[in-house]
Image (cartoon, rainbow, N blue to C red):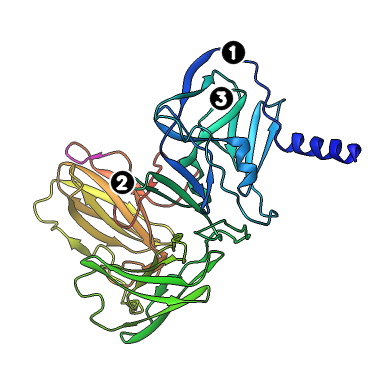
Amino acid sequence: MKKLLSLLCAVLMAATMVVPAFAVEVIGQVLSTDIRAYINGAEIPAYNIDGKLAIVVSDLNNYGFKTVYNNNTRRSSVTRNYSASGNFTSVPSKASGLPIGTRVMDVYKSDITVDLDGRVVPACNVDNRMAIYFSDLQGYGSYVYDNNTRTSKIVLFGSSSTGTGTINHVEKLKLVKSPANYQLKSTSEKVAFTVQISGGTAPYTYKWFIEKDNGTSNQSATLQKTSSTFNVPFSDSSFNNTKTIRIYAEVTDSTGAKVTSGKATVSPVAQTTPALKKEPEPQNGTVFLGSQLSRESELKISTGSKSAYIKLKDKNKKDVFAFYVRKNSTYTISVPAMELYLYFAVGEDWYGSADLFGSSTVYYRDSSITDFENYTWEYDLKQTYDGNFAPSYVSENDF
């Protein structure tokens, strides 16, 4: 019998072993408080430290948590103990009957840290035991403080909210799938958007939102299942007064846990671009912008295997002159006597002055401004190893 009793004592001692402390400097006090703390309806001893409600870390072993201290890292780690099963027993604080603000213990300086599932939280050493603020547990469940009843309560996710709480492992509510982006295929179409979740506690309230530039509307449905589909009709007037339409869902389970999906963007029916139509190639030297009358300088262009649409811009990059030179040709044209930038587009098939050579058009410019006021110029657009002209690529918009 003595051997069994000794073994039992050893087990109890192991379960309630306190953290060794080496610091002796007193930095504060633990005071009594009239506020009571509850986990799943069962009271846990609570105290006032620096005006906040605090609990002793090791006490959490009796309320659905597991605490482990590592002396090498000087850290006490707290995790949920989902394998535990049974009732929580209320244990009021021994200081609960004392006048408010009565000194109960001292707070000591310590290098020990405390983490809750890896998240380090504020902690302090109280008489060789680590204490944390009760409110830091709210990530594990629904947390409520009632000033009228002077109570602070947390209901762990998946557990009973009244009486002594039985620990049941319920996965935290998570978002699995958000509604997908969609481009309308017709001006009258009904589109289905789906959100999927996991975990949490049924029933679930699915609140669907339709977000536009001029406002947001919503509608809700409460379901037992972990997915919801929202059917939205669209018409040719759907994009009146708005450039964007986004669909998303907010899901709340029966414990109040909430997740919000990503937003699905709805795009209007794509406008089809008509196919380009070839046009007859312009004559060599055809002028598209400006006039050759009263010009005081000259520009000579020689092309290679591709035709060129030549454009001249002034210092402000404003179009001044434009003309056409066919492939394997040379053309000399009169230009204004001023400083100008030379731009040119090359290609093969001609699709008109708006589309030039279609999708095969390549745009260039001479990076240096050209002085036509004092000189005449000749540009040879055929590639050569000993040339002195290295054009730069430009975009269609810059051209």
| Numbered label attached to residue 381 | none
Which quarter of the rendering shows the N terminus?
A: top right
Where does residue 41 sit, x and y in percent of width and height? 51, 53
Q: CA distance from mark 3 to mark 2?
A: 90 Å
Q: Residue type at mark 1?
A: Val
| Disc nearer the start of the sequence (2/1) | 1
Within 10 Å of disc 3 (Cα), the crowding (few <14, some 14-19, many 20+) is many
Secondary structure of the residue carrying numbered label 2: strand
The residue under label 2 is 378
Looking at the image, residue 299 sits to the left or right of residue 4; the answer is left
Three-letter residue code for mark 3: Val
Please report the bounds of the magenta region as a residue range: 369-373
In the displayed structure, 50 sits above or below 237; it is: above
Residue under the point 34% across and 64% down: 326
Q: Secondary structure at mark 3?
A: strand
Residue with the mark numbered 1: 24
User: Closer to the camera, 120 or 245?
Assistant: 120
Q: Quadrant of residue 241?
A: bottom left
Residue 139: x, y in percent? Answer: 50, 48
Q: Earlier in the sequence, mark 1 or mark 3?
A: 1
Mark 3 highlights which residue? Answer: 126
- The quadrant holding residue 287 is bottom left
- The answer to whether 130 appears left or right of 256 in the picture is right
Residue in front for this viewpoint, 334 or 355? 355
The amino acid sitting under disc 2 is Glu
- 266 part of magenta stretch: no
Q: Nearer the viewer, residue 382 or 182?
A: 182
